[in-house]
């Protein structure tokens, strides 16, 4: 079938260029790490709130990626979705194993690269939000980070977290409301 | 509808994740209910504040540098290539590739030697003595192709010879690709140029795109790379002389109602980037065309320094790997944007890591130079120097970070960092 022949050529081109890491090629694996280390580390940091935890999770994620590299099927989903899933699972796993209460998100300075008019959130508001994030359960942090940091669709979040689409909808809604409730409490207002 | 039922849907509504019937419910209800309008407003401000806080917080941290070393120690990545040979044979890619390659070679040889064409009564378009080419042959003269090697807007703009906004005026013709054996065709489309963002180009260009056809008509080719249709508008990032690369979803962004979309958004196939997984940062989902153009212009106005592979000039290089004792070259490309003419000077130093500016002594056994290191750089020009890395067999294995700094005139400076990996020594019997 011509279509099949054509698809094969495309598959060959794509796989041989981008998926060498799946064959165990060390250079390609390192390139993969270089490409996605920020994505994994920053997500782990936002979910756990700790650089040390995020560092350990970064290592665990890429060890897992190496061990299960042949299970990733690019036809069934995006590589980043797969990486998100492993990252989220590692965050949850560590929490379970260590009965860890994820610590406060470290106070970090706003980057200086943004000009003042681009910073729409005041420093005070920013600190409040970070404080409010600390109070949320991990499952709520996970969906907020996936949606509002990574811009994943609800469907992608459902695939990543392994819950039905409806649960994603209600969880995000609930998480945002809890967050707003916390902000109101901090301001001394009655939760709305 | 009660407000509490609407409340549950408001976040999804703002995230454009409700279905049409839910949307209707909400939009029927909102104008009549101030409480829900207020709730929507509060949710929107929390959501936007959260976006900014998460983004700022993530921007303030970077992964530590030694994690990869620990990953390697925890796996078998330190082993040489042949150690993984059985893995490679078992991999899905290889399992697919081997039979396909064999079939392609056998069919190619039969076709090329004239056996197969005679069997099927077909007069070959190319002489039987021409060896079959399992590569991408150049398309018709004058065609261009999309830029495909980039990780961010700077690299995309820098590696494009021409950037245009164009409308597909007509599909000119469809001719069998020289190597396509009657199945794969080159489809030529004429674009009317609406706006030139970079390069010099006439009012019309012709793009050749690979396509698939069988006797019954068009077969939908690669879903992620659909053929151009008359009337479509595109932003195209093109190279002039890379006709063999006229396939892929890279370097083309579709305009619908003055909004710009990357190919993954057009086809709904998030794998559309393929090899361009690298390009996920350039995921556009309905960005205003004016904003997109402003972004391109801003990038084109700025100074961009990139490294490219000295053998394949269009391939952006961020890292390289070779054995101690080896010699490697990398192209150092500087786009001057709106600046110049002025003196440009390169300096080279070794740094601790990608993000460090602290110079450390160059390793014994490594010598890095750039030529030319000083020249006058002109406005809207691309200047190329060669970075030469000479090593001796005594150079210890490991990762070395080489930073090339430029000083352009008195006030402009910047840098780019190259990761140089020296392979571990192979020991006998391992």
Image: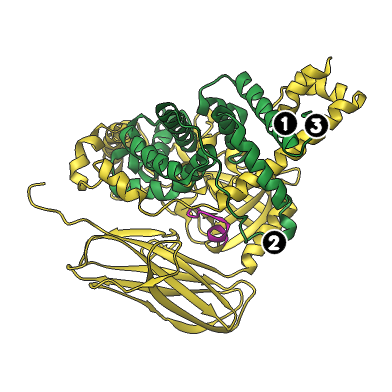
Which mark lies nearer to you, 2 or 1?
A: 1
Chosen colour scheme:
by chain
Chain at numbered mark 1: A
Residue range corresponding to the magenta coloring? B148-157
Residue on which disc 2 sits: A115
Q: Residues within 10 Å of mark 1 (few under 14, many from 20)?
A: some
Q: Evaluate whether label 1 is on the same chain as label 3.
A: no
**C-alpha distance separating marks 1 and 3:** 15 Å
Q: Nearer the viewer, residue A68 or B144?
A: A68
Asked if labels 3 and 1 touch by Cβ distance under 8 angstroms, the answer is no
Please identify which colour was used for chain A in the image: green
Chain bearing tag 2 is A
Q: Which residue is mark 1?
A: A181
Could you tell me how many numbered marks the image carries?
3
Foreground disc of the pair 1, 3:
1
Q: Is residue A140 left or right of residue A33?
A: right
Q: Quadrant of residue B9?
A: top right
Tag 1 or tag 2, which sits nearer the N-term? 2
User: Chain B: what color?
Assistant: yellow
Residue B324, given in percent of the width and then of the height, sits at 21, 64
| Residue beneath the point at 61% across and 38% down | A151
Task: Name the element at disc 2.
Answer: loop
Q: Are marks 2 and 3 in contact (CB under 8 Å)?
A: no
Residue at mark 2 to residue at mark 1: CA–CA distance: 30 Å
Find residue B40 and name its label: 3
Outermost residue, right direction? B32
- Image position, residue A14 (x, y; %): 41, 41
Q: What's the distance in space between the residues labelled 2 and 3, CA to CA?
A: 29 Å
């Amino acid at each position: 079938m011509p279509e099949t022949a054509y698809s094969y050529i495309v598959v060959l081109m794509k796989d041989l260029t981008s998926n060498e890491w799946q064959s165990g090629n060390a250079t390609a694996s390192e390139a993969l790490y270089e490409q996605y280390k920020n994505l994994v580390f920053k997500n782990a940091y936002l979910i756990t709130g700790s650089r040390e935890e995020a560092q350990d999770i970064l290592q665990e994620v890429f060890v897992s990626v190496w061990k299960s590299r042949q299970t990733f099927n690019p036809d069934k989903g995006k590589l980043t979705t797969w990486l998100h899933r492993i990252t989220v699972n590692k965050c949850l796993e560590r929490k379970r194993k260590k009965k860890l209460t994820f610590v406060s998100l470290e106070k970090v300075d706003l980057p200086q690269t943004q000009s003042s008019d681009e910073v729409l959130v005041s420093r005070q508001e920013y600190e409040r939000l970070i404080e409010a994030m600390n109070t949320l359960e991990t499952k709520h942090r996970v969906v907020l980070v996936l949606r509002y940091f990574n811009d994943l669709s609800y469907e992608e979040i459902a695939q990543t977290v392994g819950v039905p689409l409806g649960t994603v909808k209600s969880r995000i809604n609930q998480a945002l409301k809890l967050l707003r409730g916390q902000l109101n409490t901090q301001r001394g207002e009655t939760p709305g | 509808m009660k407000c509490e039922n609407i409340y549950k849907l408001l976040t999804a509504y703002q995230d454009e994740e409700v279905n049409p019937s839910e949307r209707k419910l909400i939009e029927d209800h909102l104008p009549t209910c101030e409480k829900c309008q207020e709730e929507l407003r509060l949710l929107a401000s929390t959501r936007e504040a959260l976006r900014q806080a998460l983004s700022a917080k993530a921007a303030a941290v970077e992964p530590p540098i030694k994690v990869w070393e620990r990953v390697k120690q925890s796996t078998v990545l330190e082993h040489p290539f042949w150690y993984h040979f059985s893995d490679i044979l078992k991999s899905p890619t290889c399992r697919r590739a081997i039979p396909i390659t064999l079939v392609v070679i056998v069919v190619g040889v039969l076709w090329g030697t004239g056996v197969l064409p005679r069997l099927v009564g077909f007069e070959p378009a190319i002489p039987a003595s021409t060896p079959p080419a399992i590569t991408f042959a150049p398309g018709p003269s004058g065609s261009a192709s999309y830029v495909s090697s980039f990780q961010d807007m700077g690299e995309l703009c820098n590696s494009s010879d021409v950037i245009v906004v164009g409308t597909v005026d007509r599909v000119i013709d469809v001719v069998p690709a020289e190597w396509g054996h009657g199945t794969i065709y080159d489809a030529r489309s004429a674009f009317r140029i609406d706006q030139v963002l970079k390069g010099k180009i006439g009012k019309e260009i012709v793009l050749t795109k690979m396509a698939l056809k069988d006797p019954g008509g068009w077969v939908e080719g690669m879903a992620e790379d659909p053929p151009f249709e008359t009337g479509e508008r595109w932003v195209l990032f093109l190279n002039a002389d890379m006709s063999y690369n006229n396939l892929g979803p890279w370097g083309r962004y579709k305009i619908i109602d003055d909004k710009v979309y990357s190919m993954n958004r057009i086809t709904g196939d998030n794998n559309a980037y393929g090899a361009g997984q690298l390009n996920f940062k350039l995921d556009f989902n309905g960005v205003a065309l004016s904003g997109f153009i402003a972004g391109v212009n801003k990038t084109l106005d700025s100074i961009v320094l990139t490294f490219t592979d000295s053998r394949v000039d269009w391939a952006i290089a961020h890292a390289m790997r070779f054995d101690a004792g080896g010699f490697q070259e990398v192209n150092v490309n500087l786009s001057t944007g709106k600046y110049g003419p002025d003196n440009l000077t390169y300096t080279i130093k070794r740094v601790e890591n990608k993000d460090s500016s602290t110079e450390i002594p160059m390793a014994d056994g490594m010598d890095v130079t750039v030529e030319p290191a000083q020249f006058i750089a002109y406005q809207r020009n691309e200047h190329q120097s060669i970075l030469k890395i000479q090593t001796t067999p005594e150079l210890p294995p490991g990762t070395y970070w080489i930073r090339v700094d430029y000083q352009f005139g008195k006030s402009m400076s910047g840098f780019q960092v190259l990761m140089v990996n020296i392979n571990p020594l192979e020991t006998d019997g391992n």
